[in-house]
């Protein structure tokens, strides 16, 4: 970070950090089970096109954002209303496909790991 670092830079680094940390979790899960090539997402972060594209790129997975970003609430409403009132409002799903090559992914992962190591080392220092 420098004095030129903007709010947008911080937001971008946060989203990229979440995607890269999630990539590590997915790698651990894939050692135990085949999770396929498509990951479905919903919730607050799924509203960010930038996050979903970056997530697709670093995981080399197709990311499926459901027509509703709040599927838990939608499911509860559907169950509560069924069979009295049909619940509508779902829109079309959106898909994000990996758009960068493996070398670029490796570069991004390397930068992330270096930054994490630097943060760990900095956290161990006393001032």
Image (cartoon, rainbow, N blue to C red):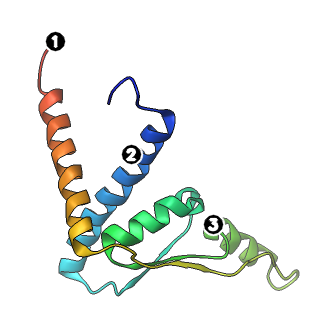
User: Is residue 112 left or right of 79 when viewed as pictured?
Assistant: left
Q: Secondary structure at mark 1?
A: loop
- Which residue was labeled with disc 2? 13
Q: Label 1: which residue?
A: 127
> Horizontal placement of 79 versus 95: left or right?
right
Q: CA distance from mark 3 to mark 2?
A: 22 Å
Give the percent coordinates (x, y) of residue 31.
18, 78
Q: Where is residue 40 shown, x and y percent of the image?
A: 49, 77
Q: Quadrant of residue 118?
A: top left
What's the distance in space between the residues labelled 1 and 3, CA to CA? 44 Å
Residue beneath label 3, please?
Answer: 69
Marking on residue 48: none
Q: Is residue 25 above or below residue 110?
A: below
Precedes in sequence: disc 2 or disc 1: 2
Which one is earlier in the sequence, the residue at label 1 or at label 3?
Answer: 3
Asked if 96 appears above or below 108 in the picture, the reply is: below
Question: Which element carries disc 3, helix, strand or loop?
Answer: loop
Q: Report crowding for label 1: few under 14, some 14 to 19, many 20 or more residues within 10 A (C-alpha).
A: few
Which residue appears farthest toward the top when viewing the image? 127
CB under 8 Å between discs 3 and 2: no
């Amino acid at each position: 970070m420098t004095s030129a670092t903007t709010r947008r830079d911080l937001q971008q680094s946060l989203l990229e950090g979440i995607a890269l940390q999630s990539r590590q979790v997915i790698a651990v899960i894939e050692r135990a089970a085949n999770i396929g090539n498509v990951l479905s997402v919903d919730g607050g972060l799924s509203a960010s096109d930038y996050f979903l594209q970056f997530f697709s790129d670093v995981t080399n997975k197709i990311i499926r954002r459901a027509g509703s970003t709040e599927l838990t609430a939608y499911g509860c409403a559907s169950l509560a209303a069924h069979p009295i009132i049909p619940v509508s409002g779902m829109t079309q799903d959106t898909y994000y496909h990996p758009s960068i090559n493996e070398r670029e992914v490796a570069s991004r992962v390397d930068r992330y790991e270096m930054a994490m190591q630097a943060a760990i080392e900095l956290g161990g220092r006393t001032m």
